């Protein structure tokens, strides 16, 4: 009976160790979605929106095709997304710019632009 408990406790310990060892690998394998929902919560049209990769050589992965009216949403398809961190730049009709570097698309699937 004692031998069975020792084996059981050993198996539980090995299982926990294996699970903990795989957590960093799971975090690194996080992938951005194929598309991002953009919502214009401002009272003026969003004229342009560009999403690029972060880093020294940014690459355009999505762009708003036409102006987005106030209160409306659009879905942008990400072209060959790489990594989780992205730079988002939006320009509104009242000449206000909204920029955000380091948006984590592995966690965030939507962009909501507000005043």
Image (cartoon, rainbow, N blue to C red):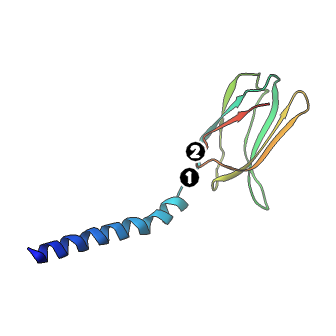
Label 2, residues with CA under 10 Å away: few <14, some 14-19, many ≥20: some
Which residue: 91% across, 32% down?
95
Q: Nearer the viewer, residue 17 or 55?
A: 17
Q: Position of residue 23 (x, y in %)?
A: 46, 63
In-image side of 46 versus 74 (left or right): right
Q: Position of residue 65 (x, y in %)?
A: 76, 31
Q: Nearer the viewer, residue 74 or 25?
A: 25
Location of residue 5 (image quadrant): bottom left
Extreme residue in the left direction: 1
Q: Is residue 23 above or below residue 80?
A: below
Q: Position of residue 98 (x, y in %)?
A: 82, 39
Q: Is residue 26 above or below residue 104?
A: below
Which residue: 43% across, 65% down?
22
Q: Which residue is mark 1?
A: 31
Residue 33: which numbered mark, if any? 2
Q: Nearer the viewer, residue 8 or 19?
A: 8
Q: Is residue 22 above or below residue 98?
A: below
Query: What secondary structure is marked by label 1?
Result: loop
Residue 23: which numbered mark, if any? none
Which residue: 90% across, 27% down?
94
How many angstroms separate mark 1 from mark 2 (CA)? 6 Å
In-image side of 69 versus 34 (left or right): right
Location of residue 20 (image quadrant): bottom left
Label 1, residues with CA under 10 Å away: few <14, some 14-19, many ≥20: some
Q: Nearer the viewer, residue 26 or 80?
A: 26
Location of residue 109 (image quadrant): top right
Q: Quadrant of the C terminus?
A: top right
Q: Position of residue 104 (x, y in %)?
A: 65, 50
């Amino acid at each position: 009976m004692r031998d069975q408990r020792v084996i059981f406790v050993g198996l539980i310990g090995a299982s926990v160790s294996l699970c903990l060892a795989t957590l960093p690998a799971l975090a690194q394998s996080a992938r951005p979605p194929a598309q991002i929902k953009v919502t214009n919560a401002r009272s003026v049209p969003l004229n342009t929106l560009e999403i690029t990769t972060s880093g020294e050589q940014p690459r355009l992965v999505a762009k708003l095709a036409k102006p987005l009216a106030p209160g409306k949403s659009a879905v942008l398809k990400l072209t060959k997304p790489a990594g989780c961190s992205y730079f988002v730049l939006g320009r509104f009709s009242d000449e206000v710019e909204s920029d955000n570097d380091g948006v984590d698309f592995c966690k965030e699937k939507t962009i909501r632009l507000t005043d």
